[in-house]
């Protein structure tokens, strides 16, 4: 599986609350009402791609089928054609963090900062 495919799958797993569902079935349980409370459709959600290079663009293309509002941040803005192909809208990073339901980081690690100087946290409320 490609990195972009894996990232799209991780987004779906997060939004659909897959891990608790899987654990319930594995344990012979099934509380569909409890799971449904914390499971969402991706359709209509705002998804941000931080780092819209080749992989970020491929993630966006894979998520187009889910009818999401797709935003991206990159130091150098993409061309209008690239934005249209990916279904992207450019946004500032602080606007992305304030307005997106899901943010995927596809940014290449910095070569000038020490290792582990940037930490990305995935959490749900």
Image (cartoon, rainbow, N blue to C red):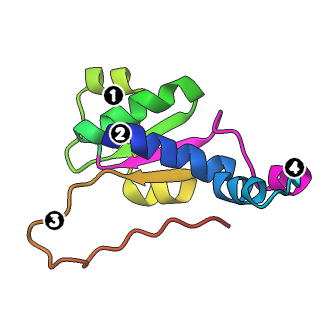
Local SS, label 2: helix
Marks 3 and 2: which is nearer the front? 2
Secondary structure beneath label 1? helix
Q: Position of residue 51 (x, y in %)?
A: 29, 49
**Disc ID at residue 32:** 4
- Residue count near mark 4 (Cα–Cα under 10 Å), binned few <14, some 14–19, many ≥20: few
Disc with the residue nearer the chain's start (2 vs 4): 2
Of the numbered discs 3 and 2, the one sitting upstream in the chain is: 2
Q: Which is nearer the N-term, disc 3 or disc 1?
A: 1
Magenta stretch holds residue 11: no
Taking the spot 68% from the left edge, 67% from the top edge, the residue there is: 125
Task: Tell me the residue at 88%/55% (across/down).
Answer: 31
Residue 4's tag is 2
| Magenta span | 33-51
Q: Is residue 66 above or below residue 7?
A: above
The spot of residue 67 in percent (x, y) is: 58, 27
Image location (x, y in percent) of residue 46: 56, 43
The reply, left or right, for residue 51 in relation to residue 101 is: left
As rendered, which of 71 and 56 lies closer to the eye? 56
Q: Quadrant of residue 93?
A: bottom left
User: Image quadrant for the N terminus?
Assistant: top left
- For this view, does 97 lie left or right of residue 13? left
Q: CA distance from mark 2 to mark 4?
A: 30 Å
What label sits on residue 110 in the rendered view? 3
Point out the tag, 4 or 1, that comes first from the N-terminus: 4
Residue 88 in sight from this viewpoint:
no
Q: Nearer the viewer, mark 3 or mark 4?
A: 4
């Amino acid at each position: 599986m490609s990195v972009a495919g894996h990232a799209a799958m991780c987004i779906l797993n997060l939004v659909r609350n897959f891990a608790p569902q899987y654990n319930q079935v594995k344990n012979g349980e099934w509380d569909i009402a409890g799971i449904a409370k914390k499971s969402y459709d991706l359709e209509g959600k705002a998804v941000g791609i931080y780092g819209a290079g080749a992989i970020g663009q491929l993630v966006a293309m894979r998520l187009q089928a889910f009818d999401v509002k797709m935003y991206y941040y990159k130091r150098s803005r993409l061309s209008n054609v690239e934005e249209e192909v990916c279904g992207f809208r450019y946004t500032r990073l602080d606007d992305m963090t304030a307005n997106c339901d899901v943010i995927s980081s596809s940014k290449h690690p910095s070569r000038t900062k020490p290792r582990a100087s940037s930490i990305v946290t995935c959490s749900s409320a």
